[in-house]
Image (spheres, grey):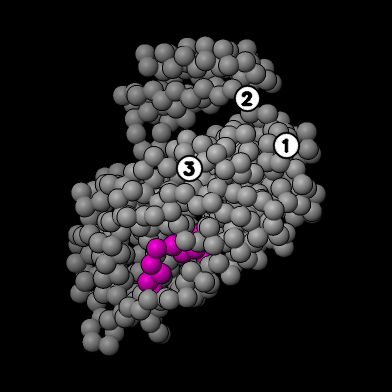
Amino acid sequence: MARLFGTDGVRGEANSVLTAELALVIAEAAATVLAGPVAARESKPVAVVGRDPRASGEMLEAAVTAGLTACGVDVLRLGVLPTPAVAHLTGVYDAALGVMISASHNAMPDNGIKIFGPGGHKLDDGVEDQIEALLGREVAEARRAERPVGAGIGRVRDADDALERYLAHLSGVTDQRLDGLTVVVDCAHGAAHLAAPRAYRAAGATVIAIHDRPDGLNINLECGSTHLESLRAAVVEHGADLGLAHDGDADRCLAIDADGRVVDGDAIMTVLALGMRDSGELAENTLVATVMSNLGLHIAMREAGIAVRTTAVGDRYVLEELRSGAFSLGGEQSGHVVLPSYGTTGDGTLTGLRLMARMAQTGQSLADLAGAMRTLPQVLVNVPVRDKAEVARSQRVLDAVAAAESELGESGRVLLRPSGTEQLIRVMVEAAEPELAQRLASELAGLVESV
């Protein structure tokens, strides 16, 4: 059986793949692993549950709440809030676990379940495996026999102060006022439609909010961090200093400069890393990034005297590296940026605040700040294959990669990566010249397809 948990929780089409029944047993299993067996508890544990505005979130919230309370766990419903808010409030409310119901940047028919442990930390593979092990029919039936009754059943209440607590947290991530800056924020009709505009206004920025009216069906629909066209147009139309785009659950942030150019996660990390180096906040003078970050980021950091630690793709792996080395900044090209001093996971609104704070502090435009990194042309080809593991170990493929790397020298790189969820090989080539990157990527993709 395929592993249920992916790189960011459990995700799939709501009510067909991710059903209410599955959500209930996942919640039961997570409660058992993270709060302990009912018989071993000295008091009722607490779980917090939040969601994005998808219509299916209402159904899945009810199922998750039922699973948790059936295991004797009290539930604090947070309502519609960003994923990083749920992570933060898991710690604030001293909860045994937190659950976020969201499929992030995916289209509306999908939904997902993300689980946080005590303190709001993402679960490692071992804990997720323990949860999956409790989902089998025989184990689930045995667990149902241990469900509490009477006063032992969990109770449910709404955390009416959840948004205010999260906004209070965001108010402390920078002392720099943003007065004089005008920002267009694309809320993706998602979980940050209230929190992000309020946080930016509270810091002093003039805020023009777009795609901030969720109706349960329009989340990420031609908007947000995966569809930047309308944000680009709004920035230019309003003469704004920048635009910020969040995804459905607001753990990402991408930017648009005043001229309408995209500033991706790599460029944002460059701006923040240089600022944190200058202020002495960059622990060990080190940035953590994934293998998908552009070579231009590595070159910019090397020229700035900043080391780069590289991880597998996925913000959970960035988080693990940050925690293992006590580093203070990491992230992904996609816009997940993590500052462990202020949060246990990527936080798009926090990232936006810190990015604008750097602009206000230096008096420089976003284009000037992001110009510290030159993005090298990057070509990515997804190649369907019969057996990705066989292709990954093919000597013909390995030899071809070595030859391409030799041709590129230090001015480019090659990355072949099996997909984590599909029978695909992702072929990525970066080079100083786009024509060279395209040629080598096409040649390698053709070889991969023939293996």
Position of residue 257 in the picture relative to residue 197 (left or right): right
Disc 3 marks which amino acid?
Ser
Q: Which residue is mark 1?
A: 368
Instruction: Assign the N terminus to one quadrant of the image.
Output: top left
Q: Which residue is mark 2?
A: 376
Q: Nearer the viewer, mark 3 or mark 2?
A: 3
The Cα–Cα distance between marks 2 and 1, rounded to whole angstroms, is 17 Å
The circle drawn on residue 225 is: 3
Q: 226 above or below 437?
A: below
The Cα–Cα distance between marks 3 and 2, rounded to whole angstroms, is 21 Å
Say what secondary structure mark 1 lies in.
Answer: helix
Position of residue 6 in the picture relative to residue 333 (left or right): left
Whether label 3 touches label 2, CB < 8 Å: no
> Where does residue 331 sit, x and y in percent of width and height?
58, 45
Q: Nearer the viewer, residue 262 or 340?
A: 262
> Where does residue 12 sit, x and y in percent of width and height?
29, 47
Say what secondary structure mark 2 lies in.
Answer: loop
Residue 384 painted magenta: no
Disc 1 marks which amino acid?
Asp
Q: Nearer the viewer, mark 2 or mark 1?
A: 1
Q: 245 above or below 444?
A: below
